[in-house]
Image (cartoon, coloured by chain):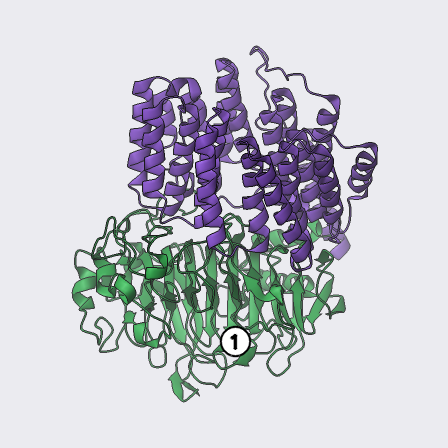
Chain colours: A green, B purple
Amino acid sequence: MKRITASLLVCGLLAVGMAQGAEILVTSNIATSTTWTADNTYNLQNQIYVLPGATLTIEPGTIIASTPTTNGAGSLAVCRGGKIYAVGTALKPIIFTSKNDDFKTWRPVCNEWGNLTIMGRAMISNTNILSQQSCPLGSNVSPMEGLVEEFPGDTRVLYGGNDDNDDSGSLMYVSIRYGGRVVGLANELNGLSLGGVGRETDIAYLEIMNNVDDGIEIWGGTVNLKYVSIWNVGDDYFDLDQGWRGKAQFGLVVQGYSADAAQGSGVCDHCFEMDGAENSDAQPVTTANIYNFTAIGQPLAGRAGTAWRGNARVQFHNSIFMELGTNLVRFDNASDNDNGYAYNGTLTWAETWTTPYSEAWNKSNPKTGGHPNVSCASEADLQAMYQAQTSGKLAEINYCVFYNNLNSGAYSNSNGYNYVAGLSGSNCVGNIFATQSPIRALVRGADVTAGGKTLKPVVFIDPRAVNDALTAAPAAPADGFFTPVTYRGAFSAYDNWLVGWTAAYQYGMTGLQGDVTGDDQVNLDDISVLSENWLLSL
Amino acid sequence: MKTIIRLLWIGVLTAAVCPAAEKKPQPSGAASEASVQELQDQPLEPWRLELLDVAFETAAKMPIKPHLKDRSRTQAMVVETALKLNQPERALRYLQQIENWRRGACLADLAVYAARQQNAPLAEQYLRQAREIAEKGLSGAHQEPVQEWRRDLIQSKIAQGYAQLGQLETALKAQEGLEPSQRGKMLLGDSQLQQKDLFDKEVQRLDSELKQNNADVRNNVLFSYAQMYEMVYDRQEQRSQLEEKIRNSWSPLPVFLRIQLLTRLTEAALDHNDSAKALELLDEVRRLMEKYQWPDETQFTLGAPLAALRYRAGQPQEAEKEVQTLLKSYEAKRQSIFNIYRADALRPLAEAYAQMDDKDTALALYKRAVEEGVENLNSRPRAEDLAATCCSMVLFAVEPDAELRERIRQIHKGLGQPW
């Protein structure tokens, strides 16, 4: 009885917490710094830019709920020189969503509004654009995918520059749901788009739930991310491009669908898609370091755990890849529209897996090799220099747990590179092919057909580590960013950091409802925390 | 019922909060060890001190919520300016008001300054305080998530401090395992580098860092070589060795960094009255500048210092032509440069004129920079611009006239919502 009473009280307090006041229609760009407060809801009416010099501050507990429209009109983008401070708390997350969100029930929809885009001035590589240099001049800029120039020379849509320490603000405890405007073919908005975002920007505790395109896509820059959760998006979940040189730790990927639409625009594609640079010989090239992710695939509809393009170099450590649709590792050079691995003397993909992180990229003359690109020859012998890696090989999947990846090609690849050997050989070490689930619970609902594919939607997970996920792995470096934990995957045996602030929690897809303290019980401790939080907000 | 719960909680919270509220938190990093002899400010014209204070107060006006990072970054810039002008007491007073990790970085800078002044006890005291912030963060409520480059930036400065004190082992230990963006920075000071064995050791250490093959490390190492180049300029062999190292290693770096490196070498040549070498370097930079198309903002920050150096190198007419060309370019491109970046473009032009002994034009350009800085509607970029312009005027010794002083005062006073 005490438990039931406590649950009811907790639900009541949560409901109080969600109660919102006036609806503010946001119709024009933010040129003057503005604070959005938790006693209102904000409805984005069109593409809203936070212009250079302006700051958008969003208070904890604020809901930005936009009117659902075809190809979601309402959207928010922070320009270079603009800032966003959206710092919520575990009990008062900041929620970007559609007005159709009832905060109780998951719906199989997306594209009801736009997204959150942040553009900064850190270095990028984009040789797709005429006049952009593959030499690292620090002058490359690029228009953001999914944003449209409203007039010739509209610089609001541009990202990139020469300041890797750039600061676009802070995002913490932010949940982004049901978004992803479709601008055109292969031109859609991701849940969170980060273009040229610098390392002084802080991003932690961020969730994407349902989006038409990717969950998080990062183009260049040096921003680091910690505690990210990406569910049910319609394309890739964590997508890297144009020379991102960052780190990420503690991430959850749960593949699914967000609309009855084609794969890539409603039905999940890859868990990770990685592109080094638009042409492989350009710098900087994506060279990243990822620890402690849990990637849960779609056994029938999803594609690869990791897709590799365009000279990408990414290290995966201490992670879980389970129930993938196809391969764990996919050589995806052919899908790239640009020149990929091995272009212009760069390393082949296979060589990337066996080359130390500190080696030059030019295989013919690895240490000092001159650049074969005539236009750059006198200026740069572009080496593997722009990176966040500090040890190991350029590409690695080490100390991970693989579970229930039942596709016949899960550990092999059609281009002949033998990943079974690779994943257990000297260039990929410490991996475990588990026979028992590495997470506490995974419940899939009835099969659903979407985009012509059969999906097995995840309706509940308890992602905390069990079994082989608790087999100690070498801890992430204690470098001040990474937390040096030895478990594998995004969650320890005890802490489900999704509880309290995510859509997944609100929709009953994880955690015990009302258990805001995460101790697996709903009791007076939870009421105490919620009451205190409520009182402090008065 | 709701009222009862509320009253109960208010009681509990009051009891919990009040004792803490009564204790005024001691700023971490404050110099409290009174037995150590303090550093003293050197004489400086009152107007420069006044402008420094305006710059700092301008930065401090930015509200901590949400602008802690912006405010602290700008405050740290003023501290750096104060130290450049031998104002350590003032720098200490300023840095104690910084409310995030940058206080640790500024404390380490002050420690390096104290070490250079042969005040070892004070340097060690500041280093201890800086280390505390690097390791534990700043006590108090206002903290960003820890990111390694922030901690390591403090740590790299701490290493420099110990090296300047002659504690090389401690210095080397302090910079072990730093993340790439903070590796490869020079440890030793001017007097130490005059000893051949120490010079060789430092070169060896930097050479081995270079082998990391990382862009950030390489960037730092090459700028360290450039600093050493200046310090050993009179020793031809060592100077040539350093220049060769820089030239052999810069090709993978962005070209704007190469221009900045050449600018440093030119400054060093001029500081040692070697105009011939300076002109040779300046011609090389000019060719590089002309070869590429630069973003509007970059063109001025890179180009204007070169004109000033050409003036110093004995080509005043050429220099004037260069800076005038840049100014014309600014006029032509002004509309396409977003307003928050216009003062950034004008300041280096003003600085160039100041160095070319044309203080009137410099003052006129500073006035324009001040006005461009308030074009944006928001006080955060206004404050950042005003603080930067004040620091620039102080550093380049361009005294504001009454009109500009009044305008600066007005702008400073007017800072407020919206930030």
Query: In x, y percent, where is residue B289?
Result: 49, 49
Query: In x, y percent, where is residue A208?
Result: 51, 67
Residue A424's quadrant in the figure? bottom left
Q: Nearer the viewer, residue B229 or A388?
A: B229
Instruction: Name the side, left or right, on which B330 lies relative to A473.
Output: right
Q: Nearer the viewer, residue B182 or A282?
A: A282
Secondary element under disc 1, as helix, strand or loop, is strand
Q: Quadrant of the N terminus of chain B?
A: bottom right
Q: Residue at x 59, y 20 (%)?
A: B31
Instruction: Name the side, left or right, on which B89 lies relative to B193.
Output: right
Instruction: Name the side, left or right, on which B211 lies relative to B162.
Output: left
Q: Does the rendering let one see residue A185?
A: yes
Instruction: Name the side, left or right, on which A330 lies relative to A37.
Output: left
Query: In x, y percent, where is residue A505?
Result: 52, 66
- Callout 1: few (<14), some (14-19), or many (20+) C-alpha neighbours within 10 Å? many
Residue B50's quadrant in the figure? top right
Q: Does the rendering let one see residue A59?
A: no
Query: In x, y percent, where is residue A207?
Result: 51, 64
Q: Which residue is mark 1?
A: A188
Q: Residue at x 63, y 20 (%)?
A: B89
Q: Nearer the viewer, residue A407 or B119?
A: B119
The answer to whether A180 is drawn above or below residue A9 in the figure is below
Q: Residue at x 29, y 71 (%)?
A: A330
Type of amino acid at the residue the image marks with label 1:
Glu
Q: How many marks?
A: 1
Q: Nearer the viewer, residue A339 or A5?
A: A339
Q: Chain of mark 1?
A: A
Q: Residue at x 21, y 72 (%)?
A: A412
